Image: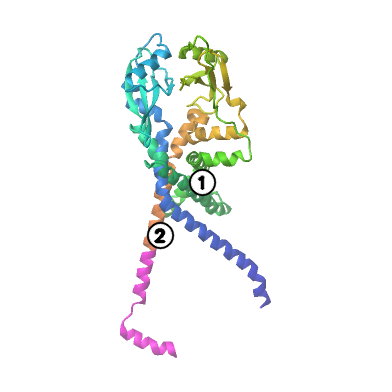
Amino acid sequence: MNQSIANEPSLSKSGTKLRLRKLWLSVHRWLGLTVGLLFVLLGLTGSLLVFDHAIDEWLNPDILLTEGQGPRKPIEEIITAAETAFPGDTLAHSATTPRVENGVWSVWFPSGTSQNPTFTSVHVDPYTAEVTAQRVWGEYPMTWIYRLHFRLLAGQTGGILVGLAGILIMISLFSGLYLWWPLWKNGWRAAIAIRRGRRFNYDLHKSIGLFSAVFLIVITFTGVYMEFPSIFRDGISWIAETTKPAQDLKSVPLETDSSITIDEAVEIASQRFPNARLDHLHPPESEDGVYEVAFRQSDEVQRSYGRTQVFIDRFSGDIVEIRVPKDSTAADIFFAWQFPLHNGEAFGLFGRWVVFFTGLTPTILYATGFLMWWRKRQSKKRQSRNRKQQNTTSPLIESEAEPIAMT
């Protein structure tokens, strides 16, 4: 009796661990079977979006690429050509420089309605200032895939669903690591080896999951951040200093009321950052607005969008304000890293390929996980049928067995 009481704590502890493991196994299984299907969609579309601009140029070379050579047209002429081609009297909101050497300018205009606002890009050849096309963002293949990936084509509601799914996916990933950890005690073969035969699906699932887990967790977390940026920013601003966006910057009219050109504004800004690459610019949006000229410096973590900003008075040409990444706070740096980590560009072409292949792993994990679940389900059905058959006996045998059982 005393020996039994002494063993109770260890037995209780072992039973608790077993119940906890079964609980997390159930959580992992059912999250994988349900939210995992959405994870597959997000992974595959994400892999495509890693190289979205290159794919877009490959699909539309006549629109996005040029064979022009020689001197390039002034930026003022590029934007004027776009404004002339765009219907109505709407002025350009921004202009993005050619992405590649033989690329075109993209001049952006607000479009759509107040209920359904959109942006239209007018593409202009930098050598001839001829408009090659106009496209509404979200209505051509790569931006349609982006809308599917980011918000399931369902607007803000879809974005909330994706963000919540991302949280559940991270729970599934952490539960998978929790379930894998005890295998290491049985040696490397049980932990990471992929064996043939009946254990192939199981081994492939656990090994692919292990090797991709860190990348998947980082990519998923950054995706959740981008779905709920205001929540993260508001929360972090309580504990860390953040830099506010440049606001209320105005140009001071002169007696002559003459305005400098866009090219002059770019030249003034370039003198401050002669080794930086011009990335995009915003013309003044009002009579007293300012030019914003943005560059990308070589040490910036985000490679697809320049964060070095120069704001210039449209009348005097004086620099009103400068924003550079090196002056960022720790919180600003955290925010700036999210998108480059999500698509891999923080680590150049190598990082992009890592994210590309990582985006394919949810498909493997879902397929192997589903097969394991299906086979286990079928096995249970067979066992249940076998038990029923074994329990089914003839009336004669039952009547003969009853007295024996009673004696």
Q: Secondary structure at mark 1?
A: helix
Q: Which residue is mark 1?
A: 210
Choose top left, top right, bottom left or bottom right for residue 53.
Answer: top left
Q: Are marks 1 and 2 in contact (CB under 8 Å)?
A: no
Q: Which secondary structure class fits the magenta region best?
A: helix
- Sequence-wise, the earlier of marks 1 and 2 is 1
- Residue count near mark 2 (Cα–Cα under 10 Å), binned few <14, some 14–19, many ≥20: few
Compared with 16, 199 (above or below) is above
The three-letter amino acid code for the residue at tag 2 is: Lys
| Disc 1 to disc 2, C-alpha distance | 22 Å
* Left/right of residue 2 with respect to residue 52 in the rendered view: right
The three-letter amino acid code for the residue at tag 1 is: Leu
Compared with 242, 317 (above or below) is above
From which residue to which does the magenta span run? 380-407
Q: Which residue is mark 2?
A: 376
In reply to whether residue 401 is colored magenta, the answer given is yes
Of residues 215 and 240, which is closer to you in this image? 240
Image position, residue 160 (x, y; %): 45, 45
